[in-house]
Amino acid sequence: MTLAFLVFFPMIAAVCSYVIGRRSKDARDGFVIVSCLVTFAVTLSAVVGVARGAAYQLTIPGFCGMALNFELDGFRALYALVGGVMWLCTSMLSRQYFAHHYHNRNRYYFFYLMTLGATLGVFLSSDLFTTFIFFEIMSFTSYTWVAHDETPGAMRAAETYLAVAIIGGMVMLVGLFILWMTLGTLTISELYAAAEACESRGALWAAGLCILFGFGAKAGMFPLHIWLPKAHPVAPAPASALLSGILTKSGIFGIIVVSANIFRESKAWGNMLLVLALITMLGGAVLAVFSVNLKRTLACSSMSQIGFILTGIAMSCLLGHHNALAARGALLYMVNHSLFKLILFMAAGVVYMHLHKLNLNDVRGFGRKKPVLHFAFLMGAFGLMGVPGFSGYVSKTLIHEGIVEYAELLHAGGQTGLALLYTLAEWIYLFSGGLTGAYMIKLYICLFWQKHPTEQIFYDAKKPYMTWLTRIALLASAVLVPLLGLQPNLTMDRIADFAGGFLHAGTPVHAVHYFSLTNLKGACISLAIGVIVYVGFIRTKLMPKVDGERVYVDLWPEKLDIEDRVYRPFIYGLLNAGGRLAQIGNEEKLENRVYWPALRALSFAGAVVSKLLGDVLDMIAAQINRTFLAMKHYTETIRVGNAVTDTVGGAADKAAEIVNRTLLRSHPHAHHYTGTLAGWWNGMMAAVRRITHTMSYGLLLFGLGLCVMLVYLLMH
């Protein structure tokens, strides 16, 4: 019952919150906080139960033998608790954050709780089929967070997010098909034994790469990171905290499943993952250094920190039986990053909900004379930078020592040249950590030390600037950073012992002396690099003086935008290539008898499908909220008026007229019913317009077709 409650209670609460919100906004806000509090309490009790040796398993029968399977072990219980903490804190912030200047709050809270249930479904799943189902639900429900403001920028970022989610999900599904056909199982606990006995390594690699693509897209791994720097700045700050802090970890969850089971001791897999990790880590840090947007900097930082976690997973594969330090470091880095981004994005939310600005030139000086905000941000920054005495230092040190350990093993084995490559990887790791320090120093000095040239008196006068709920959320999460970091052998090591089995982490030969000179040296090198980069590059090149005042300038070249320069041209190029193929052969018979009939048939089929899809979506929306799909800040100028929709529209109007003349003629509320039919019809046509003129329309139809194919395969 515990597992079913954790997964489905938030989804039921989502519906209840929507109904309550139609009556009272204050009651809805309180209900959401209480629901998150109840979920947190149940996850905490589950952690205690697992620690005492209790076993939790749940199977929900499905069709054609495809059941939903859940279980609770140390890692799953830990991340269910992390999810509970993050949703509870962000729900407390959301009450103040959405109090003014925001619309569609009912919709936000509905999908907020739906995503909680879906995310817990991912982390509690015991087989990859269940993981995939809830992973896709989570992707679609969280899409509304990115699109929440419905501005052109938000819609474009949401379009990118949805495209990456759909493409990643479909590629992952192909990988799961291959894995099922190759191993005969998708149960996570059975993958290692089945993979060891499998002789078809090529099929395993094909499946592994497809699954890595799907989960890596959600994690923000290079080169699938394009959604991350664009989604966070436009999403509400509480949603950004969840997107960065835990939804990216659902992608890491899948990467761990593949790496720690199918490719547990594979040097080739470890090296491939290490290369991707280093690029992700360094690339995200460089983007964050150049960024002049508060939330974009934190978003690029998330990309970089995902690279750090992936480095730990890669080193765990390379080290094999000696993976204790690297695997435990990756686990603790996941937890730490979730905590740090919770703090930092909530702090950014406090700034934004007062100023409605994110550019560093506009927000500088806002944090002056605000001690609670100052303390919370400083704890998150110190943790992210890996300052000794804070929890982030522990996980950074463990992964760093894992890289050093592998280089030393290679050197001892006579592979000196190869060892030098991993020494280079170590320095990339330290330099990326230094860049982390540089951009966090930039944000800290901007918010809490600099003064705004014209608005500082106005900023200082903003008191009180936080409600007591927001203060509790910020302080409670911020206090954890030094508490976990001051006595790491009593706190962080116990967390690693509790949850490390999921990563198949070995047991350290001896206790790690975190504050020895050897371990402190790596942290000091990174921090020194950070100070040098800030003083020598950021303040001189990215903060030039204009009229005696330092101004933050964005010097990042627009032509280096991978999405606009590579991905979108590639997709549009494919579409154009398809159009040019239709022009090959200019014979009149071929054109008139083959191409044009085929194109008309495709157009007809597409129009019918889009109409049906629009009907279904909008009828559901009408029952939930008549403004559910409304885009108040997004004007559509393209008219839908092809033969199919016009014909169906005319038929519907005729049917409404007949119903009015015959069935409703004597009904006292006939005018109301016919008006409702007309309203539903106009709403459905608006849904068709919105769906059929977005980049993701074709992807949605592709996904729908693949789902139909999946059902067909399962039934046959």
Image (spheres, helix red, strand yellow):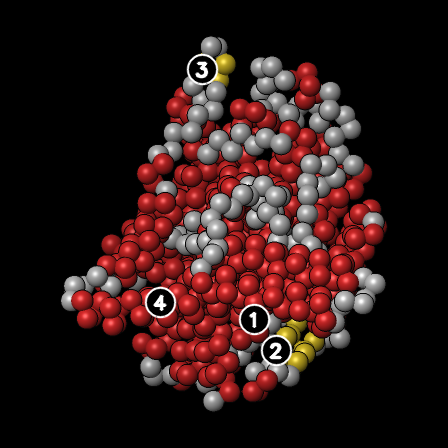
Sequence-wise first label, 4 or 2: 2
Q: Which mark is residue 133?
A: 1
Q: Amino acid at mark 2?
A: Leu
Query: Percent position (x, y) of residue 333?
Result: 55, 53
Instruction: Give the vertical position of 438 relative to 111 (above or below).
Output: above
Q: CA distance from mark 3 to mark 1?
A: 53 Å
Q: Amino acid at mark 1?
A: Ile
Q: Residue at x 24, y 54 (%)?
A: 417
Q: Which mark is residue 76?
A: none
Sequence-wise first label, 2 or 3: 2
Is residue 169 at all visible to an observer of this figure? no
Q: Amino acid at mark 3?
A: Lys
Sequence-wise first label, 3 or 4: 3
- The quarter of the picture where residue 121 lies is bottom right
Q: Which mark is residue 600?
A: 4
Residue ranking furthest to the top: 547
Say if mark 2 contacts mark 1, CB within 8 Å.
Answer: yes
